[in-house]
Amino acid sequence: MSANDRPTGQPTATYESAFMKACRRESVPHTPVWFMRQAGRSLPEYRKVREGIPMLESCMRPELVAEITLQPVRRHNVDAAIYFSDIVVPLKAIGVDLDIKPGVGPVVEKPIRSRADLAQLRDLTPEDVAYVTEAIGLLTAELGETPLIGFAGAPFTLASYLVEGGPSRNHEHTKALMYGDPQLWAELLDRLAEITAAFLKVQIEAGASAVQLFDSWVGALAPADYRRSVMPASTKVFEAVKSYGVPRIHFGVGTGELLGLMGEAGADVVGVDWRVPLDEAARRVGPGKALQGNLDPAVLFSTTEAVETKTQEILDAAAGLEGHIFNLGHGVLPSTEPDALTRLVEYVHTRTAR
Ligand SMILES: Cc1c2[nH]c(c1CCC(=O)O)Cc1[nH]c(c(CCC(=O)O)c1C)Cc1[nH]c(c(CCC(=O)O)c1C)Cc1[nH]c(c(C)c1CCC(=O)O)C2
């Protein structure tokens, strides 16, 4: 199946939605909008349903996952939902001893630094994440024509948590392994590619209309290192889901120098942070790909007028693109005023209505 055929089981209205059309670089009724981290702490209704439930546990309760995923769709009129989960959920599901610490992020009990440590990473089966299949079933029934984006962490970003043992500014242990034992590094990334591919397949088979591979921290690498040490694993993930014909989005922070390679890895849509204007990003990515982005999430703390000015600059830079999905350049910051997001969706829809 090519990326332009409707996958079996997907409703026509979903396939014909603005978000899906923009991913396929077809003409759209308006520029579609969604936000990375649109579900989560910026919403009071999220904080209310999450009260007393640890993050990872909340990802394993299908009804709660469905509710949290739907909250921003109801509130902001976004053009897509993103499945509520976290990039470390598939690792937890295969038994890696890790937790998500509030205000910190994922923390791994026994970091992976040697060949023996690789034994922590067994294959992921659909049964390991039955709650994902169940939650997506609930969601597609509720969402109607609104597409659901499934997601996973890319091998490099997952490896960075596994090797460091937690969040890291400089990724020193990760780079020590990557440069010092390229063979073990390649095996680690290949294992993660298989787990990630299996996890994305579960989401697509359950009904996700598109997938996003988050390589959030890969901007820490120079292009030559990305090409040699990371790209083969990311390519393997994209290849593994290609035959489903669902759009594949790829995003990382600070990846201005990597945008071309990230597209080449197999993405249909390349996500761009706020550091590179979209017209310049299009030159770097080349033809045949849609772009997603790229308002600095911190701009939402400014005045409505400033948000609109910055947003209009992005829409102008995107005017010549083959396909554009409006998004932030990274996730919604937790203290963002929710109404600022609702106004932003409305602004983009109005300014781009055709
Ligand atoms: C790097 C990364 C992680 N997780 C994720 C990434 C890639 C995206 C990115 O670059 O931001 C992906 C992710 N994590 C979460 C989502 C939800 C879906 C959505 O976008 O709405 C998504 C897409 C929920 C979450 N994941 C997490 C929260 C916060 C926990 C909570 O609400 O209690 C949420 C809503 C925890 C988490 N998990 C992670 C971090 C850095 C944190 C934040 C730590 C903190 O500040 O508390 C790892």
Image (cartoon, rainbow, N blue to C red):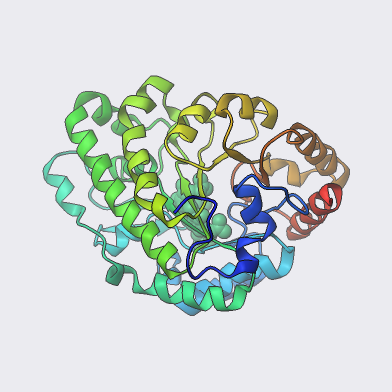
Residue 296: x percent and y percent?
A: 68, 39
- Residue 146 visible: no
Residue 19: x percent and y percent?
A: 65, 55
Task: Identify the residue at image location x=55%, y=73%.
Answer: 140
Would residue 13 appear left or right of 107 to someone viewing this image? Answer: right
Name the quadrant containing residue 176: top left
Which sits in the foreground, 151 or 113? 151
Q: Quadrant of the N terminus?
A: bottom left
> 175 above or below 215?
above
Taking the view exactly as shown, the residue that stands out farthest to the right is 305
- Residue 345 visible: yes
Taking the view exactly as shown, the residue that stands out farthest to the left is 116
Which sits in the foreground, 11 or 328? 11
> 184 above or below 55?
above
Name the quadrant containing residue 223: top left
Residue 93: x percent and y percent?
A: 30, 64
Would residue 312 appear left or right of 133 to someone viewing this image? Answer: right
Name the quadrant containing residue 34: bottom right
Task: Identify the residue at image location x=50%, y=72%.
Answer: 65
> 93 above or below 319?
below
Which sits in the foreground, 313 or 279? 279
Residue 348: x percent and y percent?
A: 79, 49
Would residue 53 appear left or right of 327 to someone viewing this image? Answer: left
Give the total number of marks visible in the rendering. Answer: 0
